[in-house]
Each structure stands twice: as C-alpha cells, then as structure tokens.
Image: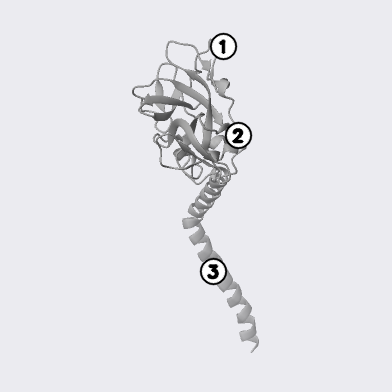
Amino acid sequence: MEIWTRAIPRASRAGRASWASRWGRIWARTGTRWGIASRQARTWAKAWHCSRPTARPHAVSEPWSQVDKKKQPVAVAEPGGALTKFTDECTAETDHCLRPWVWFVDIGADKIIPARWTGTAWRRAADPDSPVEGARLGYRTRPAKEAEVKVGATVLVYTSDRPPPSEYEAHMWGNWKLGKVASVDAAGHRFDLEDEASHFAIANARILVLGWIAGEKAEAVDP
C-alpha cells in the first residue's frame, strides 16, 4: 500500500509533465500562428469599427464656397474617396448627401447631371473617369424651403417621393430633374412640374443659387 501511495504522486507528476511537454510541442508548432491570427482579428475589428456607418452630420454646403475670387469654379482634382452605397439619411438637413463640390450641369433635353469641375472639364460625380458630354450651364444649389416651392418657380428635384437612399444614388445621373413648378399640394408636401405626371416631395427640391458657363463669370440665378 505504501509503495502504491508513493507511486500515485509520482505518476501524477509524470502525467502533468507529459501533458505539459505535449502542450509545449503543440504551442511551438501553432502558437505563433494563433498569435498572428489573434492580432489580425483585433486589427480587422478595429478597422470595421472605424469604417462602419455613422450618423451623417447635419450640414449644408454654401453654394458660393465653390467659386473663386475670379468668379470661376474651384478646381477639385480628386472627389475624396468612393461614394458610399449603404442606406443613409439623405434629407435636406444633410444636403441630400451631396459632396460639397457638387455642381448640377445642364446637358439639354431637361437632363441634369451631378458633376465635379477638375479645372479643365466636368466629370460625372458618380463616375470620376466619365466626362460630361454637351455641358451647358453648371448650377450650385441648396435645399429649398417649403415656401420657395411655388407655382412658376424653377427648381431642381430628386425624382422620387422619398429622399435619395444613399450617397451614391444622390450623385447618380438620371435621378435629378430641372423644371418649373406647375402645382403644389401643401397639405401633402408634394408638387408637380410642368409636363410631368409624377408627384415630387417638396423635401427633395433644391433651389438654383448661381450658374456658370465656360468663358463667363459665375452669376447669381434670379429666383
């Protein structure tokens, strides 16, 4: 019995030593990889936390901020990163999610394109490498006040009964229309444009503040 009882602690210690040795060998083979993976996971988590959508600040770009002392458009060489496509709060309070450099360029046939002036040419806001063909007047705008959307007024409007769903959609060509207000439903906060059957949300309307065409100076647009 005494031999047996003395053998048990020795066996136990031997077992622990054996397991410790085995764990040491496993860690030697995999520990470094686990350490690297753990550090990578922390890095990715931090990157996700920094890049996840946050509340968009309530700010509106001053229309004249993109005009220099010579009354020419301020050149913007780079758009400042890709336009986001996640669901966003693109209301009048957030300037409809438009980048501060956005101009709306008239290309005729009631077509208006959000664009960026590079210093020598217009580029489509939603596609930095795509030029704007047939550019005429370029406009700087601001969100319209409800009282400004009245019969006879010329307004720019996002063609939906809801705000743009994302920053990307706010800058896409084909989503904005320029026209004269034909009728207003004040109770429903909607209005119609001349020669248009659709009803537009007043909250999606923007007022033309100034205009510019190549070779001329920027001037205020008559209300």
**Kind of residue indicated by mark 1:** Lys
Q: Earlier in the sequence, mark 1 or mark 2?
A: 1
Q: Earlier in the sequence, mark 3 or mark 2?
A: 3
Give 154 or 18, whichever is nearer the viewer.
154
Measured in 3D between alpha carbons, the distance from the residue under mark 3 to the one under mark 2, in whole angstroms, is 80 Å
Above or below, 170 against 61 in this view is: below
For residue 97, say whether it is visible: no
**Kind of residue indicated by mark 2:** Ala
**x and y percent of residue 131 in the render?**
36, 25
Q: Quadrant of residue 63?
A: top right
| Residue contact between numbered discs 3 and 2, judged by CB atoms under 8 Å | no
Measured in 3D between alpha carbons, the distance from the residue under mark 1 to the one under mark 3, in whole angstroms, is 78 Å
On residue 19, which mark appears? 3
Answer few, some or many: residues within 10 Å of disc 3's Cα (few below 14, many 20 plus, some between 14 and 19): few
**x and y percent of residue 17 in the render?**
57, 68
On residue 205, which mark appears? none
Q: Residue at x 56, y 65 (%)?
A: 20
Answer few, some or many: residues within 10 Å of disc 1's Cα (few below 14, many 20 plus, some between 14 and 19): few
Relative side of 111 to 8, left or right: left
Relative side of 200 to 10, left or right: left
Q: At numbered mark 2, what does the secondary structure look like: helix, strand or loop?
A: helix
Q: Earlier in the sequence, mark 1 or mark 3?
A: 3
**Kind of residue indicated by mark 3:** Trp
In the picture of the structure, the residue carrying the numbered disc 1 is 69
Q: At numbered mark 1, what does the secondary structure look like: helix, strand or loop?
A: loop
Give 41 or 53, whichever is nearer the viewer.
53
* Quadrant where the N terminus is found in the figure: bottom right
**x and y percent of residue 61 in the render?**
58, 28
Measured in 3D between alpha carbons, the distance from the residue under mark 1 to the one under mark 2, in whole angstroms, is 32 Å
**x and y percent of residue 25 in the render?**
49, 60
On residue 147, which mark appears? 2
Which marked residue is nearer to the observer: mark 3 or mark 2?
2
